[in-house]
C-alpha cells in the first residue's frame, strides 16, 4: 500500500494538452480600482509599499496606468497618503478616504461621518472605502449591531452622492465563509488557515441577511454611486449581480480577489462581462501588486485558455480548482480595464482609444 497522502500535500499536475497564452500586459492601459498601499495595518513607521518607484516599474511592466489606494483613512493619515502617492506621482495613484467608525460612540454619528467625508474630499480624496465590518461588527452607542442599511448612516451616503465620490463597499465575504465548517465547505483549507474569517450564524448575521440589507441600501440612495467590491460581494451568483445591475443604475462592481470564482463559471462569466461591460471595474486586491499577480487576470479576460491556475502559485489558497478564460472583445476590455474607472472616479482620467481609432 502506498503511504497515505494529506490533502495539504496533494498537488496534481494536469495532463491536458491545450492552448496556452501567457499574457504579461493588459491589452489596454488599465486602472486597478481596488488595492491597498497605505500603512494603517503595517508596523509603525512602515508602508505596504516600501519603494514607490519600484512599484511603478511593476505597474509599467503590466501596462497599469493607475492604482486606487483604498487606505487613505482621514485627517493627517489621508494627507500622508496623498503626499506619498497622488501628489508625488500625479495620475498614477487615486487615494480613497475611509471613515472613522469610532464616531459611533456619538448619538449623531451619521452627521459626524458625513462632515468627516466632506473634510476628506476637501483634502483630495477620490472616493470612500467601506469595510466588511459594517454589518458584521460595528455597534452603536447602545451596543446594538449596526445594520448595513441603518438609516442613521443616510447622511454619509447622501454626502458621498452630493460630492460625486464613489463608495467602494465590501459587504460580507465569500459565501463559504458563512457556511458550516465541515467536509462540504469549499474553502475548508483556507478557513483552517484563517479561522478568524469564518462567520457562522449565530452569532453573525447570515449571508442572505447581509446581501438583502445591502440591496436595501443601494435602492435607498439612487444618487450615490456604489462600487460593490469583489463582483458585487456575491461572485458565486452572477445572475443576482446581473439583476442588481439591471435594477440599480448606481450599482457597479469590481472584480478584485474573485478570479477563482469567476474563472470556474466561464459561460456565465462571459455572459455577465459582455452584458454589463460598462458596470465592471478591473482590480486586484493583492498588495503590494506585482506584474506576476496581474497576469492571471489578463489571461482570464483576454484568452480562451482552459484549465489554468488562477494564482501565480498552485494550488491557490482559495480552492483546489482551475479556471477558464472568457476571451472578451476589445470594446469590453477597454471599458473594464480603463474607461469605467475613469468615468466613475471623478472623470479625471482620459479614455483609452482602440487601436487604429
Image: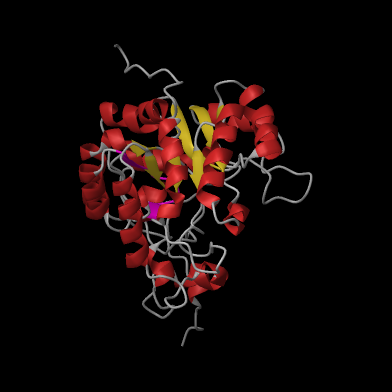
129 or 69: nearer the eye?
Answer: 129
102 or 23: nearer the eye?
Answer: 102
Q: Residue at x 56, y 45 (%)?
A: 112
- The answer to whether residue 273 shows anywhere in this view is yes
Q: Which of the colour schemes (rainbow, by chain, secondary structure, one colour) is used?
A: secondary structure
Quadrant for the C terminus in the image: top left
**Residue 98: horizontal and vertical position, in percent?**
56, 44
* Direction from residue 65 to residue 266 in the image, left or right: left
Residue that lies at the very extreme toward the right in this rendered image? 45
**Residue 147: horizontal and vertical position, in percent?**
43, 61
Residue that lies at the very extreme toward the bottom in this rendered image? 1
* 341 shown above or below 232: above
* Direction from residue 74 to residue 136 in the image, left or right: left
- Count the numbered circles shown: 0
**Residue 59: horizontal and vertical position, in percent?**
55, 30
105 or 173: nearer the eye?
Answer: 105
Q: Residue at x 62, y 55 (%)?
A: 102
In the rendered structure, which segment of residues is drawn in magenta?
Answer: 250-260
Q: Residue at x 39, y 73 (%)?
A: 179
- The answer to whether residue 263 shows anywhere in this view is no
Residue 254 in magenta? yes
* 335 shown above or below 129: above
**Residue 132: horizontal and vertical position, in percent?**
48, 56
Residue 292 in magenta? no
Residue that lies at the very extreme toward the top in this rendered image? 357
Amino acid at each position: 500500500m502506498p503511504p497515505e497522502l494529506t490533502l495539504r500535500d496533494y498537488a496534481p499536475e494536469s495532463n491536458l494538452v491545450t492552448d496556452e497564452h501567457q499574457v504579461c500586459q493588459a491589452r489596454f492601459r488599465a486602472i486597478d480600482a481596488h488595492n491597498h498601499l497605505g500603512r494603517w495595518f503595517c508596523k509603525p513607521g512602515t508602508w505596504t509599499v516600501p519603494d514607490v518607484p519600484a512599484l511603478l516599474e511593476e505597474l509599467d511592466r503590466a501596462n497599469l496606468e493607475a492604482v486606487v489606494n483604498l487606505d487613505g483613512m482621514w485627517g493627517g493619515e489621508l494627507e500622508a497618503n496623498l503626499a506619498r502617492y497622488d501628489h508625488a506621482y500625479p495620475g498614477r495613484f487615486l487615494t480613497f478616504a475611509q471613515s472613522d467608525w469610532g464616531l459611533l460612540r456619538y448619538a449623531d454619528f451619521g452627521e459626524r461621518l458625513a462632515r468627516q467625508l466632506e473634510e476628506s474630499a476637501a483634502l483630495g480624496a477620490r472616493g470612500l472605502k467601506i469595510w466588511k465590518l459594517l454589518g458584521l461588527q460595528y455597534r452603536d452607542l447602545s451596543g446594538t449591531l449596526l445594520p448595513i442599511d441603518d438609516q442613521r448612516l443616510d447622511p454619509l451616503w447622501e454626502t458621498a452622492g452630493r460630492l460625486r465620490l464613489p463608495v467602494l463597499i465590501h459587504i460580507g465575504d465569500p459565501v463559504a465563509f458563512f457556511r458550516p465548517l465541515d467536509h462540504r465547505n469549499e474553502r475548508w483549507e483556507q478557513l483552517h488557515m484563517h479561522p478568524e474569517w469564518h462567520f457562522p450564524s449565530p452569532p453573525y448575521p447570515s449571508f442572505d441577511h447581509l446581501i438583502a440589507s445591502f440591496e436595501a441600501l443601494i435602492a435607498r440612495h439612487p444618487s450615490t454611486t456604489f462600487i460593490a467590491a469583489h463582483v458585487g460581494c456575491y461572485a458565486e451568483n452572477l445572475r443576482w449581480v446581473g439583476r442588481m445591475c439591471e435594477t440599480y443604475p448606481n450599482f457597479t462592481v469590481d472584480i478584485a480577489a474573485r478570479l477563482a470564482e469567476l474563472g470556474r463559471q466561464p459561460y456565465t462569466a462571459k455572459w455577465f462581462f459582455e452584458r454589463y461591460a460598462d458596470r465592471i471595474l478591473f482590480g486586484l486586491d493583492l498588495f503590494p501588486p506585482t506584474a506576476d499577480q496581474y497576469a492571471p487576470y489578463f489571461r482570464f479576460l483576454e484568452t480562451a485558455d482552459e484549465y489554468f491556475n488562477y494564482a501565480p502559485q498552485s494550488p491557490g489558497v482559495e480552492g483546489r480548482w482551475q479556471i477558464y478564460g472568457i476571451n472578451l472583445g476589445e470594446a469590453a476590455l477597454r471599458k473594464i480595464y480603463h474607461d469605467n474607472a475613469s468615468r466613475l472616479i471623478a472623470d479625471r482620467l482620459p479614455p483609452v482609444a482602440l487601436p487604429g481609432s
